[in-house]
């Protein structure tokens, strides 16, 4: 990692990092810092300390030159903060991912710096020696900061950053390590005189002192994620496991069996689905080698011993996703713990059971029947999964990790909801086809994926066939859509999951269907009034009711106000808790967003707020929801009005859905059918107005066409009369010509009329005098005469053509009158 120059702290330049997709020995990234001296030689600067922040997948590493390197694994970026000064300890501030506590060597201060630009926002002073330990309590009652040097420890109150408690030591009993237990209930310190002292955090009274006789030169202690066990180790080859529940030692392990002479540092590496017990313990030996010890199998599963240098220190991320080793030469190796553990469990030369089965049991038919060994192993796996998927164990995992892994989320939800997998009952609903209420659902929702649209139609249709209520509830498509996106690969699981949610987590929603659930909204309003009276008053002043700040969120299942990842995490917690939790989550969302809500002063602004995604800290949302669940008085608590969770029964049909006014729904359905039947006779005011306008327009157009037709008929009659007169005059003129009586005046008149006929047509509208009108009449007579003449010529030509066609062939009868 070459040193880069940058300007001011406000314009930090970020660089790309590339993680190894196929890491060797689990190393996904290596850090080293080199600078060029005045003579051009390269000098390596050593890293001294590091800390992880799993919430946003960040890592902070400090070197002995006063630089801090920030690495963001989610965005694959790194940047450098300079001018901080040499530091001895680092720690991210919980719920503030962009704030880092740096324990400076100068004056032994603690600086709160912004990780984006390196600016110092707060400085705490009070220590007389360099700080070595920084720890935050996770207690819901008291949230304190613990900082400690070798000679003293100070508790800081985070509300106003004042000293809450100071622990001083004496010579010979200096602090080796001090930290909070994972739950934050106790404060545990390890001293140089090989004693462990435990205080109650709330009262700071000593509750236990441990003096292990077998363990000498104690150096380090470590806790499992559930806080039920503590490991103690030192320079002697002994490891002691201590129970925090019974305050007794569980076992003493002789490390010499594993060729470990002593331990400089120990830490548990959490794994998925281990229930927080953390059976893998990382031990940094006095030989600067890192060993991963499986406490269940009592064996070393992996050893990390870099060829270039020994390991001086290591750090594990809170959830165990990553861990790093700081080498003695100053380099940093970052490991993917899952890859390290999995590779140690599966030797590269050994084929998996599935691969072996495929090789040893070839099959030429299209249907492959599993062997008895495979079926038995599959049954064993399913049995183990059922044991692992115990709801209590899953809740413990959720409380430790904050969410379930994406890969196993459908399986975990299935276990939490205890879906029966009624294939026969589901097939009977599928056979009924698409319900009429959701036949054209694509007109209401813009769904680009045809597969998602198909699955959504199928789910809604099955729900409507199962219960007629779900065919009239307008909010249902928006409620089920996010579940379709998550569980659409298993339609049966999707239907049964949504059905179970509607039966348990949507209790009292349909009590007054199709009208709003007054009881549910009253419960939410009472809880909000209990915990935030000012926010409720603000809603009342603006005119906002619970139908806006509660019902809109419930009807969309939080999908409109949360991002996809936030929505998944929230529903992990909803499905892992009692049905009342979803209502507490609604109140929690409003309270966490209270500052933003109070700035909105109009009804429209507040209504739009609950229809869009707004930035929110998901940890604060969940923490407040659990606090409301535990601190709400019983007389207004939702669990007083809701039933306990009940899963669907296994069988050939699904149980009948109740809890809604059947008479009202039946009347609504009957009215809907009547509207369809009488659709042609029932029109709205807009339809009647439109039809009246169309009728008037058609009447006027018909009247105009009749008038035009009548004028044309009159014109034709007049033309016929004129033609008859013309015939008579023509006949008379022919007779006169035959008799030799030639009248020059008549001939002259006809010629003038024929010549003036076009002019009469052009000047008819321009001049409205009587002369032009007379000429127009004469021109019409002349035009009709011309038309008749042309028609006579056409008839003569047609007769000639017919005569040609009827002319006899050479072998025709000689008596034919047309013969030649």
Image (cartoon, helix red, strand yellow):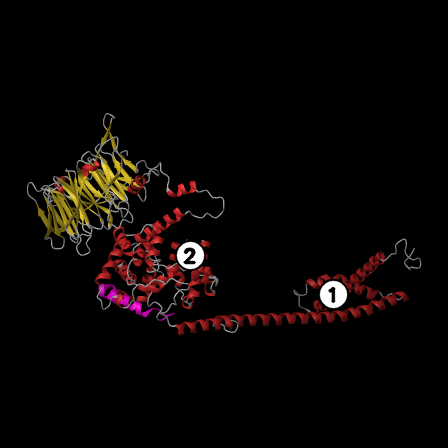
Percent from the top left, x then y, of residue 494? 39, 57
Question: In which quadrant is the C terminus drawn?
Answer: bottom right
Relative vertical location of residue 649 with respect to residue 313 in this rendering, above or below = below
Question: In which quadrant is the N terminus drawn?
Answer: top left
163 vs 315, left or right, is left
Percent from the top left, x then y, of residue 303? 25, 36
Kindly indicate the quadrant of the structure image that contains residue 8: top left
Q: Foreground: 117 or 726?
A: 117
Residue at 25% in and 63% down: 535
The crowd level at tag 1 (other Cα within 10 Å; few <14, some 14-19, many 20+) is many
Residue 537 appears in the picture as rendered: no
Residue 422 appears in the picture as rendered: yes
Relative vertical location of residue 742 with respect to residue 263 in this rendering, above or below = below
Percent from the top left, x then y, of residue 145? 16, 49
Whether residue 528 is in magenta: the answer is yes
Pointer 2: what residue? 491
Q: Foreground: 301 or 528?
A: 301
Residue at 30% in and 36% down: 25
Residues at marks 1 and 2 touching, judged by CB atoms closer than 8 Å: no
Whether residue 606 is in magenta: the answer is no
Pointer 1: what residue? 779
**Helix, strand or loop status at disc 2:** helix
Residue at 84% in and 58% down: 800
Q: Foreground: 567 or 773?
A: 567
Residue at 34% in and 59% down: 418
**Helix, strand or loop status at disc 1:** helix
Relative vertical location of residue 635 with respect to residue 259 in this rendering, above or below = below
From this viewpoint, which residue is outermost toward the left?
A: 171
Which span is picked out in magenta? Answer: 512-536
> Which of pointers 1 and 2 indicates the residue nearer the eye?
2
Whichever of callouts 1 and 2 sits on the residue coming sooner in the sequence is 2
């Amino acid at each position: 990692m070459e040193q880069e120059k940058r300007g001011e702290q406000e314009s930090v330049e970020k660089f790309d990092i590339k993680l190894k997709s196929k890491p060797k020995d689990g190393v996904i990234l290596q850090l080293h810092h080199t600078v060029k001296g005045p003579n051009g030689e390269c000098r390596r600067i050593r890293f001294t300390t590091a800390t992880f922040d799993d919430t946003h997948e960040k890592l902070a590493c400090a070197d002995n030159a006063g630089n801090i390197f920030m690495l963001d694994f989610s965005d694959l970026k790194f940047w450098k903060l300079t001018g901080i000064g040499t530091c001895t300890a680092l720690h991210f501030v919980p719920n503030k991912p962009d704030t880092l506590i740096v324990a400076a060597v100068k004056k032994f201060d603690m600086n709160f710096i912004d990780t984006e630009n390196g600016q110092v926002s707060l400085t705490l002073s009070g220590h007389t020696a360099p700080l070595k330990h920084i720890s935050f309590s996770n207690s819901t009652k008291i949230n304190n900061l613990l900082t400690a040097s070798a000679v003293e420890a100070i508790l800081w109150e985070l509300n106003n950053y004042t000293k809450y408690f100071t622990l001083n030591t004496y010579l010979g009993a200096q602090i080796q390590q001090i930290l909070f237990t994972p739950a934050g209930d106790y404060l545990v310190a390890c001293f140089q005189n090989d004693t462990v002292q435990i205080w109650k955090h709330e009262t700071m009274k000593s509750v236990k002192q441990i003096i292990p006789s077998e363990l000498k030169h104690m150096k380090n202690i470590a806790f499992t994620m559930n806080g039920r066990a503590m490991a103690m180790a030192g320079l002697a080859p002994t490891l002691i496991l201590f129970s925090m529940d019974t305050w007794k030692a569980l076992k003493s392990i002789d490390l010499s069996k594993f060729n470990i002479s002593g331990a400089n540092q120990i830490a548990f590496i959490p794994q998925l689905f281990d229930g927080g017990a953390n059976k893998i313990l990382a031990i940094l030996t006095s030989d600067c080698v890192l060993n991963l010890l499986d406490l269940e199998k009592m064996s070393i599963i992996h050893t990390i011993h870099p060829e270039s240098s020994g390991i001086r220190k290591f750090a594990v991320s809170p959830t165990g996703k990553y861990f790093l080793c700081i080498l003695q030469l100053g380099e940093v190796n970052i490991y993917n713990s899952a890859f390290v553990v999995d590779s140690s469990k599966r030797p590269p030369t050994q084929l998996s059971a599935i691969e072996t089965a495929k090789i040893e049991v070839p099959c030429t038919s299209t249907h492959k029947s599993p062997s008895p060994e495979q079926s038995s192993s599959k049954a064993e796996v399913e049995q183990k999964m059922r044991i692992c998927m115990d709801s209590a164990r899953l809740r413990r995992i959720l409380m430790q990790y904050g969410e379930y892994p994406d890969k196993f989320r459908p399986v975990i939800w299935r276990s939490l909801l205890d879906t029966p997998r009624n294939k026969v009952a589901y097939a009977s609903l599928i056979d009924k086809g698409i319900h009429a209420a959701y036949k054209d659902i694509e007109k209401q929702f813009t769904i680009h994926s045809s597969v998602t649209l198909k699955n959504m139609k199928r789910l809604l249709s099955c729900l409507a066939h199962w219960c007629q209520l779900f065919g009239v509830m307008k909010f249902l498509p928006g409620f089920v859509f996010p579940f379709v996106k998550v569980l659409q690969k298993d339609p049966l699981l999707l239907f049964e999951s949504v059905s179970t949610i509607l039966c348990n987590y949507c209790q009292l929603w349909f009590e007054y269907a199709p009208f709003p659930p007054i009881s549910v909204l009253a419960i939410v309003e009472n809880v909000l009034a209990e915990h935030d009276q000012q926010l409720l008053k603000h809603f009342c002043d603006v005119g906002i009711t619970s139908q806006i700040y509660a019902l809109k969120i419930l009807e969309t299942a939080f999908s409109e106000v949360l991002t996809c990842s936030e929505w998944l995490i929230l529903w992990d917690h909803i499905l892992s808790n009692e049905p009342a939790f979803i209502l507490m989550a609604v109140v929690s969302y409003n309270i966490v967003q209270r500052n933003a809500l109070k700035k909105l002063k109009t009804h429209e602004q507040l209504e739009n707020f609950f229809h869009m995604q707004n930035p929110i800290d998901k940890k604060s949302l969940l923490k407040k929801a659990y606090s409301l669940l535990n601190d709400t008085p019983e007389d207004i608590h939702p669990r007083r009005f809701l039933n306990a969770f009940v899963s669907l029964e296994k069988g050939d049909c699904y149980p009948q859905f109740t809890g809604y006014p059947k008479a009202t729904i039946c009347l609504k359905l009957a009215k809907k059918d009547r509207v369809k039947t009488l659709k042609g006779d029932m029109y709205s005011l807009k339809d009647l107005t439109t039809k009246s306008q169309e009728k008037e327009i058609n009447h006027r157009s018909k009247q105009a066409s009749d008038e035009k037709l009548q004028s044309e008929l009159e014109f034709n009659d007049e033309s016929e009369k004129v033609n008859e007169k013309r015939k008579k005059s023509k006949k008379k003129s022919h007779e006169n010509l035959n008799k030799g009586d030639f009248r020059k005046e008549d001939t002259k008149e006809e010629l003038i009329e024929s010549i003036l006929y076009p002019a009469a047509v052009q000047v008819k509208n321009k001049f409205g005098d009587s002369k032009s009108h007379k000429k127009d009449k004469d021109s019409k007579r002349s035009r009709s005469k011309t038309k008749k003449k042309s028609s006579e010529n056409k008839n003569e030509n047609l007769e000639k053509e017919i005569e040609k066609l009827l002319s006899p062939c050479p072998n025709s009868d000689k008596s034919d009158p047309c013969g030649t």
